[in-house]
Image (tube, rainbow, N blue to C red):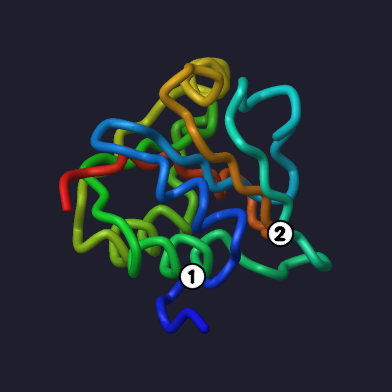
Amino acid sequence: MLKSSCINPEIMKALSLCGHGDKILISDGNYPLDSKSGEAKKVYLGVTAGVPQVTQVLAALLGVIEVEKAEVMLPGDGSEPEIFAEFRNLLGGMELSGLGRQEFYSASCEPAVRLAISTGEKRIFANVLITVGVA
């Protein structure tokens, strides 16, 4: 039985195939995962509205991998969603690279995105694209 922070077999298999520079998308429940994640392995975790949250999935992944970069989707009005502070906190104060909606969609479809995880998150702009670092 696994004792790590992530026990989902599909996610653990995909993570084991990732290397330095590969990317992982963790999306909210509104994100069009099927059409905006390219050829990435897709895992649908949403059970009900709000479960699980993107931050819960990010925390679980951080117990398994190193992250060297995090990209977020910026609202068009220039505001900063509250969840960005939670991302920074979980990532040890890491600066978040902001992308416009279409830029984020394009980045999430690149071949380097190896895993795309959909959650039940209901907060808006709660999408994060993380880059795997060196262990």
Residue at which label 2 appears: 45
Mark earlier in primary sequence (2, 1)? 1
Q: Tell whether 107 sits left or right of 109.
A: left
* Residue assigned mark 1: 6
Q: CA distance from mark 2 to mark 1?
A: 13 Å
Residue 129 pos. (x, y %): 44, 38
Farthest residue in the front direction?
A: 1
Picture quadrant of residue 54: bottom right
Q: Nearer the viewer, residue 71 or 13?
A: 13
In the displayed structure, 79 sits above or below 56; it is: above
Q: Residues within 10 Å of mark 1 (few under 14, many from 20)?
A: some
Residue 30 x, y percent position in the rendering:
74, 43
Which residue occupies 48% across, 70% down? 6
Left or right of residue 49: residue 19: left
Q: Which secondary structure lies at badge 2?
A: loop
For image coordinates 58% across by 30% down, the residue present is 40
Q: Inspect the image, locate mark 1, and give the three-letter code of the amino acid beneath it.
A: Cys
Q: Quadrant of residue 134?
A: top left
**In this view, which residue lies farthest toward the left?**
134
Q: Amino acid at mark 2?
A: Leu
Residue 90 at x, y percent in the picture = 32, 66
